[in-house]
Image (tube, rainbow, N blue to C red):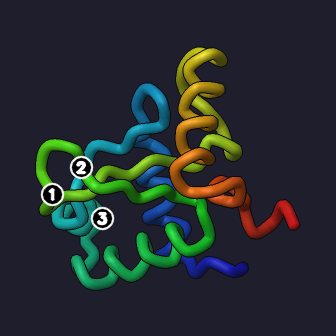
C-alpha cells in the first residue's frame, strides 16, 4: 500500500483531530475547506483509508445521513486501556476479526 502526498496530508490531518477513543468529529466538506482540497478528492482518500482499515467508517447513530470516523486503534489509542479492550471486542464482534488488520501487518 502506497499513499500519495495528498493522501498522507489528509491522513495526518485526521490524526491531528483525533479525540477520545480515536473519534474524528469532522465532515468531508470541512476537511476539504481546511486543507484547500476538493470534497471529491477527500472522499476518495477516505475511501482508500477505509479500504486499508487505517480509518474506520461507521454510520452515525443519530443522523443516518452522516458517518463517524475513527483512526484504527491498532495504530494508536487515545483513551483508557479498558475502553480500548471494550471497543475492540465490540468492533470485532460486529465486523469480524480482521476489521482492525492493517495492510502492513500481513
- Could you say where residue 35 lies in the image, as x and y percent from the top left? 30, 64
As displayed, is residue 26 above or below residue 22? below
Q: Which residue, given by chain and number where applicable, does mark 2 sit on?
A: 60
Q: CA distance from mark 2 to mark 3?
A: 24 Å
As displayed, is residue 55 above or below residue 41? above
Q: Is residue 5 left or right of residue 24?
A: right
Which is nearer the eye, 17 or 58?
A: 58
Comes first in the chain, label 2 or label 3: 3
Q: CA distance from mark 1 to mark 2?
A: 6 Å
Q: Is residue 73 left or right of residue 16?
A: right
The reply to whether discs 1 and 2 touch (Cβ–Cβ < 8 Å) is yes
The quarter holding residue 90 reads top right
Q: Tell me the mark number nearer the camera, choosing from 2 and 3.
A: 2
Q: Which residue, given by chain and number where applicable, does mark 1 sit on?
A: 64
As displayed, is residue 106 above or below residue 37? above
Q: CA distance from mark 1 to mark 3?
A: 26 Å
Which image quarter is the C terminus in?
Answer: bottom right
Comes first in the chain, label 1 or label 3: 3
Which is nearer the eye, 101 or 77?
A: 101
Residue occupying image coordinates x 33% and y 82%: 41
Q: Which residue, given by chain and number where applicable, does mark 3 sit on?
A: 35
Q: Tell me the mark number nearer the camera, choosing from 1 and 3.
A: 1
Judged from this view, the residue extending furthest toward the front is: 93
- Local secondary structure at mark 2: loop
Q: Is residue 53 left or right of residue 55?
A: right
Residue occupying image coordinates x 50% and y 68%: 50
- Local secondary structure at mark 3: helix
The reply to whether discs 1 and 3 touch (Cβ–Cβ < 8 Å) is no
Amino acid at each position: 500500500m502506497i499513499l500519495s502526498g495528498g493522501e498522507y496530508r489528509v491522513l495526518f490531518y485526521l490524526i491531528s483531530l483525533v479525540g477520545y477513543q480515536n473519534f474524528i468529529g469532522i465532515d468531508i466538506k470541512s476537511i476539504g475547506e481546511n486543507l484547500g482540497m476538493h470534497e471529491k478528492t477527500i472522499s476518495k482518500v477516505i475511501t482508500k483509508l477505509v479500504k486499508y482499515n487505517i480509518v474506520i467508517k461507521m454510520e452515525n447513530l443519530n443522523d443516518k445521513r452522516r458517518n463517524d470516523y475513527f483512526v484504527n486503534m491498532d495504530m494508536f489509542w487515545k483513551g483508557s486501556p479498558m475502553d480500548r479492550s471494550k471497543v475492540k471486542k465490540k468492533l470485532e464482534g460486529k465486523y469480524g476479526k480482521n476489521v482492525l488488520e492493517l495492510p502492513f501487518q500481513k
